[in-house]
Amino acid sequence: MLCGRGPNGDKKDKCSVCPVTTEILADGLNGGVNGGRMCWVIVDNCPGDENDSSRTQEKSFCFQCEFRYKVMAEEGLLNSCTAIGSYLTSVRLTQKKK
C-alpha cells in the first residue's frame, strides 16, 4: 500500500515496521511476498498501543479495503480461504512450539 512502513521504507524509523511486511509464515500465500496479500488477516496481530487511534482505524478499515477486494477477486474466495487457513494453522503451530 506504499505506506513506507516496510523494512526499507522511509517511515520505518518513525513508526514500527509493519508486521505484514515481515510475516514469513504467509510468504507465497495468495501469490504474495511475506504477508503482502494477507494483510487483513495479519493486521489484527499488529503490535503497538491499543489506544492508538491510527491503529484502531487501520484495523477497522481492513475489511473495507479495495486491495482486499482485489485479492479476493483475483484469487477467488476458495483460494483465499485456503490461504488464510494455511496461515492461521502455521501461526498456531508456531505458537505451540514456544
Image (cartoon, rainbow, N blue to C red):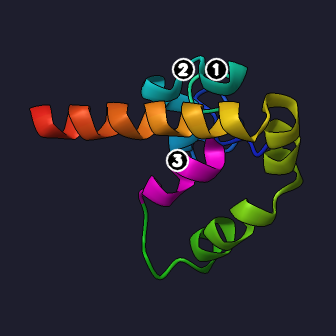
Instruction: Determine which residue is flagged by label 3.
Output: 42
x and y percent of residue 33 in the render? Answer: 64, 20
Q: How many marks?
A: 3
User: Residue lying farthest front?
Assistant: 78
Q: Does residue 40 belong to the magenta stretch?
A: yes
Residue at the (43%, 26%) spot, across then down: 25
The secondary structure type at the circle numbered 2 is loop
Alpha carbon distance from label 1 to label 3? 13 Å
Amino acid at dot 2:
Asp
Horizontal side of 79 relative to 86 (left or right) equals right
Q: Residues within 10 Å of mark 3 (few under 14, many from 20)?
A: many
Whether residue 75 is visible here, answered yes or no, is yes
Residue at the (47%, 82%) spot, across then down: 51
Instruction: Determine which residue is flagged by label 2.
Output: 27
Alpha carbon distance from label 3 to label 2? 12 Å
Which contiguous range is marked in magenta?
37-47
Q: Residues within 10 Å of mark 1 (few under 14, many from 20)?
A: some
Could you say which quadrant of the image residue 34 lies in?
top right
- Compared to residue 41, the image places residue 49 above or below, namely below
The quadrant the C terminus occupies is top left
Image mark for residue 95: none
Residue at the (43%, 63%) spot, across then down: 48
x and y percent of residue 82 in the render? Answer: 57, 33
Q: Main secondary structure of the magenta part?
A: helix
x and y percent of residue 78 in the render? Answer: 68, 36
The secondary structure type at the circle numbered 3 is helix
Horizontal side of 18 relative to 24 (left or right) equals right
x and y percent of residue 83 in the render? Answer: 57, 31
**Residues under numbered marks 2 and 1 in contact, where contact means CB atoms less than 8 Å apart:** yes
Amino acid at dot 1:
Val
Residue at the (58%, 69%) spot, across then down: 55
